[in-house]
Amino acid sequence: MTCDELRPDYLLYALGTLEDPERTELRDHLARGCDNCTAGLREARAWAYAMGSAAEAPEPSKALRNRIVAAAGGAPEKRSNWWAVLMAAAATAAAAAALIFVQAQNFRGEREQLQAAIERNRTDAAGLREMLALIESPETKEVSFGQGKPAPPKGRVFVHPTGVLLIANNLPAPPQGKAYEMWIIPAGGKGKPVPAGVFTSSTQGEAVHLFRPATPATATDVVAVTLENAAGVDAPTSTPIIVAPLQ
Amino acid sequence: MASAAIILGANERTGNPMLPLILAVFAKGDGDLLERLQRRDPQALGELYDRYGRMTFALIFRMVRDRGIAEDLTQETFLRIWNRIGGFDCERGAVGPWLLAVARNRAIDYLRYQGKRAEATVQLNETEHPGLFAGLPGDPLTLDAARQVQRALAELTAQQREAIELAYFEGLSQTEIAEKMGQPLGTVKTWIRRALQQMRGTLGGAIA
């Protein structure tokens, strides 16, 4: 058989379900180092990955992760689940984009409105990629907060010359008309607090907030969060709920 | 002061089917993690689970339709990766496709055992050897690519799609698919070949 004749069988071979005589034919091609079939199978494996990766399911139990780590000889997770918070936020934005895309297919009469919504969510997804890039940068410094306290919020602050990213959990949703405001306080917390944007948390107590400062944060700064009016204020009016010294 | 605050407070669990995929798409840079796995760091296995656990669980659940069994098989999948990571090429390999291949095989093994199906003609061990994934791009999957595959599947006839899904999600050979669908083997082979030709035409080289 020729490579062209075998091409429709690549996926079944990759899935392990191809039968003879095609299976033996394809194996022969591969054993001869056939470039066409090797490349075709590579593509088929990527198809298989894409087919399997969009399966619908409820979430697994939270205990499963620890079971797996323990079975490999590791201790249960003790760190705050900041990565899961960011991943969940990423999922929310991108899932919303996907959902809106589907809606746009179904309701063409509202195309313009939906198109605008798609663009908004694309912006969110782009922002999330920015956050991941910031987290992964070798220049980024990471500081935890809320550790050892009985009633957190807990989380982490990632500080990069171009941005300060706060990821928190156990942060109650703010009351009506209120929001959380982040501050960068110079000189070890003794300088004048610089407003660093307002944000809210989810009903699950999770929040992600990225701020791009005009001048880079320094090692002696403190990142803090207070509860303020939803529009934000120029100077903090309440006791900080989160304090994270960068030093 | 320039501020580009991005606020993502709302975090409702939507149950969107794209969720597990999205989590994996946003997971970048597996190289360091894989090297830690090869150094036998159990916490690295936890981090691998953070990146791919939901997607792996979702596939297995789709196949076995039982939460408890799906969790057991997910655990088995990750431990299989843990035990075989030494043979994986961290530089050139793509761990996501490997994980899903292993997960699918665990679920098929279970389904075969439950259905008392014979070993049949399916060659599972041939589909999950770590070396098979060394030639794949490090990050072959994007949301667009996955959507394109899903769309290409949706464009197939119901019979073509059922045949492909029986091969993928139940691991049935063409002979077994023919029996299950009550159709001659030649007919099923034609459906599948035409389906894959059509998908190839739709997708072109968009995937991989």
Image: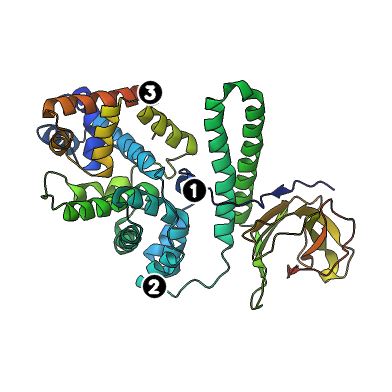
Residue bearing the label numbered 3 = B202
Q: Nearer the viewer, mark 3 or mark 1?
A: 1
Q: Position of residue A130 (x, y in %)?
A: 63, 46
Q: Are marks 3 and 1 on the same chain?
A: yes
User: What residue is rendered at 58% in x and 22% in y?
Assistant: A108
**Which chain hosts label 1?**
B
Three-letter amino acid code at the position of disc 1: Gly
Q: Is residue B169 above or below residue B197?
A: below
Relative horizontal placement of residue A89, taking residue A24 as reference (left or right): right
User: Could you say which is closer to the camera, residue B102 or residue A42?
Assistant: B102
Relative horizontal placement of residue A183, taking residue B118 as reference (left or right): right
Which element type, helix, strand or loop, lies under badge 3?
Answer: helix
Q: Position of residue A7 (x, y in %)?
A: 24, 27
Of the numbered discs in the image, which one, if any, rests on residue A70?
2
Q: Label 1: few (<14), some or many (≥20) within 10 Å?
A: few
Res A3 → quadrant: top left
Residue B41 visible from this viewpoint: no
Q: Are marks 2 and 3 on the same chain?
A: no
Q: Label 3: few (<14), some or many (≥20) within 10 Å?
A: some
Of the numbered discs in the image, which one, if any, rests on residue B15?
1
- Contact (Cβ within 8 Å) of mark 2 with mark 3: no
Q: Position of residue B63 (x, y in %)?
A: 30, 48
User: What residue is rendered at 36% in x and 49% in y?
Assistant: B59
Q: Are marks 2 and 1 on the same chain?
A: no
- The C terminus of chain B lies in quadrant: top left
Res A187 → quadrant: bottom right
Relative horizontal placement of residue A168, taking residue B60 as reference (left or right): right
